Image (cartoon, grey):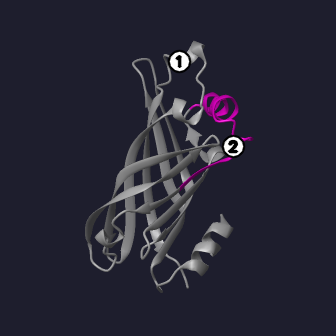
């Protein structure tokens, strides 16, 4: 992750236009009539280049926390194979980077497009992100759904009714300006 931050810092073009965090929050939720499963990761790294609109995330899979320890163990060992696929990443772009004015308090919406890599599989995704600028601080939120089948995540027949194939992913990031 340090290399990602350093690479972004050295390739940027405008002073004060890059933001980062190592404490981003990503959650996912699977809902079925039988069971709701939710997990949170509060140590997500992200770099956002405001000038170009480039946006990257990296999440350690083992950092997702569940209420139930056995569920967390099954998630890492059986479904996500965290030792083999330790990270999920997103590399993308705001299609309208000028829509976010970090110099003025307000709520801004931008379209995000890019490649989400989970479980060794990359897929194109697109969603809207909401950026909040308040007192010089910028945060971003987004929500989207993925199908586990699309990422090669197999759910055993015995628990298929407990785990939805479609999960909702929510992103909540508080960015800090990157020192130049």
Residue 29, percent across and down? 45, 36
Q: Residue at x 30, y 75 (%)?
A: 101
Residue in the foreground of this view, choosing between 130 and 53: 53
On-image quarter of the C terminus: bottom right
Instruction: Please state the horizontal and vertical placement of residue 92, each as a whole percent of the image.
Output: 48, 59
Whether residue 75 appears in magenta in the rendering, the answer is yes
Residue occupying image coordinates x 46% and y 25%: 164
Q: Residues within 10 Å of mark 2 (few under 14, many from 20)?
A: some
Q: Which residues are magenta?
A: 68-90
How far apart marks 1 and 2 lie (CA) works out to 22 Å
- Counting from the top left corner in percent of width and height, residue 159 is at 56, 17
Q: Is residue 117 above or below residue 19?
A: above
Rendered image quadrant of residue 75: top right
Give the residue at mark 2. 85
Q: Out of 180 and 122, give the one closest to the viewer.
A: 122
Q: Above or below — where is 167 with respect to 175? A: above
- Residue 146, magenta (yes or no): no
Q: Report the residue that reaches farthest toward the left.
A: 106
Residue bearing mark 1? 160
């Amino acid at each position: 992750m340090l290399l990602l931050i350093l690479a972004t810092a050295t390739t940027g073009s405008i002073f004060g236009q890059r933001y980062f965090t190592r404490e981003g929050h990503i959650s996912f939720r699977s809902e079925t009539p039988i069971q709701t499963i939710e997990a949170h990761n509060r140590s997500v790294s992200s770099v956002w280049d405001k000038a170009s609109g480039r946006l990257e995330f990296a999440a350690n899979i083992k950092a997702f926390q569940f209420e139930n320890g056995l569920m967390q163990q099954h998630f890492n060992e059986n479904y996500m194979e965290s030792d083999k696929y330790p990270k999920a990443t997103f590399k993308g772009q705001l299609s309208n980077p000028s829509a976010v004015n970090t110099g003025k308090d307000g709520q801004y919406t931008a379209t995000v497009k890019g490649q989400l890599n989970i479980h060794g599989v990359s897929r194109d995704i697109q969603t809207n992100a909401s950026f909040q600028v308040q007192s010089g601080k910028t945060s971003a939120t987004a929500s989207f759904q993925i199908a586990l089948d699309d990422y090669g995540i197999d759910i055993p027949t015995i628990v298929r009714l407990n785990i939805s194939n479609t999960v909702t992913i929510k992103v909540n990031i508080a960015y800090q300006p990157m020192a130049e």
